[in-house]
Amino acid sequence: MSFAGRLYRGENSFDFIGSRRRWYLASGALLLLCVLSFAVRGFNFGIEFQGGTQFQFPASTVASLDDAEAAVHTTGPQVASRQYVGSGATRQVLVRTSQMSPAEETKVQQAVAARFGLRVADVSVSSVSSSWGHEVTRKALTGLIIFVVLVSLFIAVRFAPKMAAGAIVALLHDLLLAAGVYSLVGFEVTPATVVGLLTILGFSLYDTVVVFDKVAENTRGILGSTRQTYSEAANLAVNQTLMRSINTSLIALLPVAGLLFVGAGLLGVGTLKDLALVLLVGIAAGTYSSIFIATPLVVDLTERETRYAALRKRVLAKRATEAGRVRVDPAVAPVAGAADGVERAADGGGDLLAEALVPGVAPRPGARPQARKSGGRPQGRKKGGRPQARRRH
């Protein structure tokens, strides 16, 4: 039997729901660290959001990034950032400065060309206004709000309003965590980062909806049963979908990791780095939140209802009663037929346990049960008549 199969059948299970408070604390600590990073470090916004001018030229004649910064700084503007982009013969130096006028841009372009022996045409110049970045941010927030509202309505109608609340909390958890990593690492926030944040919304909700679908299946008609509580059915659903969530996330993470470590690390493509990091963090956080945040929150919200609290009491009371029925006195346990009586009593036989555990009774193997004698005349004899003959079957 495979491990995944045993998880699906409930033969092996992890108590995700029972230990949910420790996961709440772990997630709260991570989010607190992210918020503190927002306040202390802030974000490294790219030129598209801050506005400014960037100069890009071949790195073959440049000794170091410090030399490139000095060449630009000698003409007056403050350098915001400098970095290498690309690799090999196509490697370039990218220097970003504050906003400049066309005359100042031409002056810097000529100074850099003269410093490193390049043609003026080899030094490319691009200028971006900060209003463009603000417009991108505004549209991204509008799209995020519309997306959250539509998804909430769908989950509320398809499953339950409490599941919609759990999914949205998990979604916000993933977005804050991804933004916090950007703040802590100091990666530049570009339009590619915004696109990545919007992309992870789908990954985050995908795993959550898969788990919710299994929770809804396991808890259908549960109020009319006393076999398990809502939290136990939800925990079984998480275990049943655990391997699927892990496998799906791994398949999605492998190409994203290739973008980050090969595209950005080895090839030096900066745009890929901005997009790949947010996708990597978002997919991993989405898998985590669907297991440790979304479903436990749904359980907490659901078991506060009176009917589910009553179900829990009924289930626990039944288990306590059954546990009391199968307790056997050590002095009586060796009596022949006791084991059979215990099994039938555990199945709901009730008085059968008392009948099976009568001291001194040892029925022959295969013998038919004897009718209980209540005193008076023997069974099978009519008053004043002859004994009736036994009928052979």
Image (spheres, helix red, strand yellow):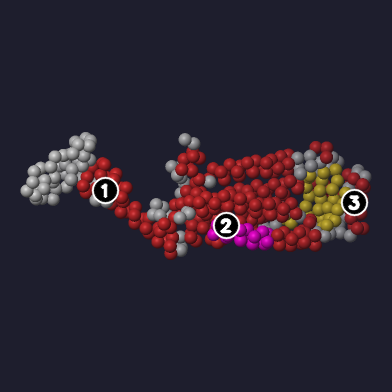
Residue 171 part of the magenta segment: no
Q: 292 or 103, which lies in front?
A: 292
Whole-percent x, y for residue 115 in the image: 89, 46
Whole-percent x, y for residue 129 in the image: 82, 60
Quadrant location of residue 31?
bottom right
Q: Amino acid at mark 3?
A: Gln
- Mark 3 or mark 1: name the one nearer the start of the chain: 3
Q: Amino acid at mark 1?
A: Arg
For label 3, the residue is 109
Residue drawn 46% across the image and 51% down it = 233
Q: Judge the density around disc 1: few (<14), some (14-19), many (≥20) Cα neighbours within 10 Å.
A: few
Quadrant location of residue 87?
top right
Q: Locate residue 384 relative to residue 176 in the image: left or right.
A: left
Q: Locate residue 220 relative to residue 169 in the image: left or right.
A: left
Q: Amino acid at mark 2?
A: Arg
Q: Locate residue 333 relative to residue 376 in the image: left or right.
A: right
Residue drawn 16% across the image and 41% down it = 361
- Mark 3 or mark 2: name the one nearer the start of the chain: 3
Q: What range is drawn magenta here?
A: 144-160
Q: CA distance from mark 1 to mark 2?
A: 45 Å
For label 1, the residue is 327
Residue drawn 67% across the image and 48% down it = 279
